[in-house]
Image (spheres, grey):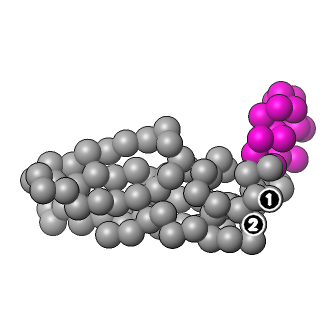
C-alpha cells in the first residue's frame, strides 16, 4: 500500500485507490470548497487510514492581523471573500 499526499488545491479529500490512498489535507484560511473552517488530516501509517478534520477558523481576526502587519490588501481581501463565501455552507469535500 502506498500513500499519495497532495496540496495546493485547497480542497480536502481522502480517496482509497487500488494501490493505496490519496490525500489532500486542505488548507487554513484559503478554502476552495465553500467551508471556511481550517482543515488538516490525521493519518495512521500502519493501517493506511486517514481522515480530514475541520476546526473553526477566525478569518475575520486573521484578516485584521494581516492588515496590522502590513500584508498586501489584495491578499487580505482574498481571504475575507473566501471566508464570507463559505460562511453559510459547510462543504462535504472530505471523506474516507
Residue position marked by numbered label 2 in the rendering: 87
> Does the segment drawn in magenta span residue 68?
yes
What residue is drawn where x is 50% and y is 52%? 11
Of the pair 96 and 27, the residue shown nearer to us? 96
How many neighbours does mark 2 have within 10 angstroms: few (below 14), some (14-19), or many (20 or more)? few
Classified by dominant secondary structure, the portion drawn in magenta counts as helix
> Does the segment drawn in magenta span residue 35?
no
How many neighbours does mark 1 have within 10 angstroms: few (below 14), some (14-19), or many (20 or more)? some
- C-alpha distance separating marks 1 and 2: 5 Å
In the picture provided, is 73 more to the left or to the right than 75?
right
What percent of the width, then of the height, locates residue 38? 60, 59
Cβ atoms at labels 1 and 2 below 8 Å apart: yes
What percent of the width, then of the height, locates residue 37? 63, 63
> Is residue 47 shown to the viewer in this render?
yes
Q: Quadrant of the C terminus?
A: bottom left
What residue is drawn where x is 15% and y is 66%? 47
Residue position marked by numbered label 1 in the rendering: 84
Amino acid at each position: 500500500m502506498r500513500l499519495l499526499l497532495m496540496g495546493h488545491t485547497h480542497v480536502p479529500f481522502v480517496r482509497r485507490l487500488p494501490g493505496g490512498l490519496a490525500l489532500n489535507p486542505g488548507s487554513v484560511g484559503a478554502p476552495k470548497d465553500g467551508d471556511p473552517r481550517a482543515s488538516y488530516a490525521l493519518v495512521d501509517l500502519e493501517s493506511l487510514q486517514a481522515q480530514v478534520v475541520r476546526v473553526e477558523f477566525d478569518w475575520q481576526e486573521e484578516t485584521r492581523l494581516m492588515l496590522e502587519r502590513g500584508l498586501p490588501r489584495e491578499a487580505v481581501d482574498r481571504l475575507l471573500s473566501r471566508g464570507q463565501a463559505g460562511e453559510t455552507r459547510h462543504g462535504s469535500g472530505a471523506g474516507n
